[in-house]
Image: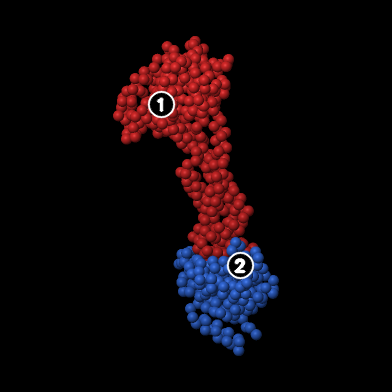
Amino acid sequence: MVDSLTHFSEAQARLVTPIVEGRGLTRTFPMPSGPVTALREVSIDVSPGEYVAITGPSGCGKSTLLHLLGCVDAPTSGSLLFEGHDVSRLSESARSRIRLTRIGFIFQRFFLLPMLDAWENVELPQAEIGVGSQDRRQRTRELLEYVGLGDRAHHRPSQLSGGEMQRVAIARALANRPALLLADEPTGELDEDTGGQIADLFDRVHADGTAIIVVTHNQLLAGRAKRHLAMKRGTVESAAPVMTS
Amino acid sequence: MTSRALAWRTMTAERARGGLAIAGVAVIGALLFDMLLLSHGLLVSYRALLESAGYDVRVVATDNVIVRMPIPNATAIAGAIERLPEIREVAILRRARAAVLASGRSLQDVTLLSISAGAERHAWRIVAGSNPGPDEQAIEPPPLVVNRKLAEAASLSPGSIVRVRVALAAASALPAVPFRVVGIGDFLFDTADDLTASTSVGGFVRAKAAGSGDEAEVLLVASRPEFGPAAAAAAIQRLRPDLRAYSNEQLVAQINENGFAYFRQISFVLSSITLGFAFLLVATLLTVSVNQQLGQVAALRALGIPRRRIAATLLWESALLVGVGGLLSIPLGWALASVLDRILRDMPGISERVHFFVFEPATAAVHLGLLAATGLAAAAYPVWIATRLPIAATLRLETL
């Protein structure tokens, strides 16, 4: 029953316009010893509400693909549409605006601003798009409670554990209600139990309707996704829905 | 949170770095402030000294106001000048080298002055005794006002009788003439080592005996306010093309071009060097700071924080470091200037009323403006690094 419901919602999701559509994405990096192709002819669609895990060995192009999908890097060849807009035709400021308003990023090393407390880190992206102070306060309070850190709002990153920092980073990524949440090894710096808590939190975010693409080596986290892309040597070797029991 | 607030939080979060940067800017800024004060201080002080004498035009015999030739027939020329409509008052200043014989001692290299009656009110300030009264001109021996240095050296006090011999050449054959000390005063243009005495016109003529003629070293002229010094100087020049009339402004400009050019050049070179140090200090600190935060900057960019916001935050950080350091540099620089001024004023030949460092609000404004420009320029490279960094490559590197 659970599986059928899940697959039904996935199928429904695919009927609407994908958030991101990559066609023949190739990314080559110039190196002193000659160009290195990190990504070869990868095509991918991610629809609203989807939860996709990308796995594979180190250096297989997972993060490169994530960066392309998150509009922080440009493909050497191929095309990328974000909500129907050709990203290659957008200016840097327009791509920046997409990242600010439609995409949330979570990093392995959290990258919270150390001089700001948890509350201020979560407020920062909202202030950037001009959310009023009252709405900002309300949203920040909701988000910190959502990630279970309502009582740690005024702690700085140095006063938080790794798991708590990652939860603040998730709250920050969700601050502007993104359509797509991108996570690059979000449990890479965390122990197994804490990684499990982050996986639970991702489940909750997904259940609330946000599409997620997570790059991970963590099988527990990858197992929570509804679609799994296995990558090897810059290509997607298999793409399949995850069958949960 | 505004860029300024974010910059302030960055600065205060790393207190040691911020404190050292501010201290560095304050010290460098203090040196810059002193160099700027030095570049104008002498001129400002010299102008104030000229104006405090109460005359705004000076008439001399040659183009050179430093090496002066005597003006012959000074009384007649002064009378003719005084009759010009632009002129309110003319005073004749005569000067001679003399020796003072008192208490069994002979003091050489004394400057003997004579200034027109009434003009002494600007030339010195009596600290003991009194100025010669109008009826004292006829009393024998002639009156003499001496400066403190001479009074101390020759143990003089009001009422003392001294003998003065004017030196026309190295070995003067003129007789020593007795004078009566009536007052001790601080002379406006004295240096710390000057031995100075002033007497009446009659006394001066008697001391110089037959060799004097009616010569003056300089004619001090006060213009009428409705004409002003420039018009007065021009009128005198028309009247006596063989003489040179300079307003105080012209004198200051001439000395700026000649006598003080040395200080101006030193000041310019040292100001440039201190600005260079300030630039390097701030640029290095900000560049190191940005390089330490590349991951955070790339993450912020990945989150969509625009380049302009990151640039503005760095510019604010630079402005805060330079601004706080710059404000601290003004009292620090002024304290340093006071010490340097005392040292420089001990040099021989410097009037005690002349200062090398004179505070002017405009100089402080220029100083802060230069520091602000330096701060902005110093932020340029770190801003370029932070706004142009490749987001994906930086995130990859910072995660390794």
Give the amino acid at mark 1: Gly
Pick the residue in front: B365 or A103.
B365
Q: Secondary structure at mark 1?
A: loop
- Residue that badge 1 annotates: B118
Q: Picture quarter containing residue B71?
A: top left
Rate crowding at label 2 as few (under 14), some (14 to 19) or many (20 or more) other CA atoms within 10 Å. Answer: some
Chain letter of disc 1 in the image: B
**Chain B shade in the render:** red
Left or right for A158, reference B100:
right
Does residue B355 sit above or below A105 in this rendering? Answer: above
**Chain A shade in the render:** blue
- Residue that badge 2 annotates: A154
The percent coordinates of residue B36 (x first, y second) are 50, 40
The percent coordinates of residue B123 (x first, y second) are 45, 28
Outermost right residue: A192
Quadrant that contains the C terminus of chain A: bottom right
Pick the residue in front: B58 or B24.
B58
Residue at image coords 53%, 67%: A125
Does residue A145 sit above or below B257 in this rendering? Answer: below
Pick the residue in front: B350 or A241.
B350
Q: Secondary structure at mark 2?
A: loop
Chain letter of disc 2 in the image: A
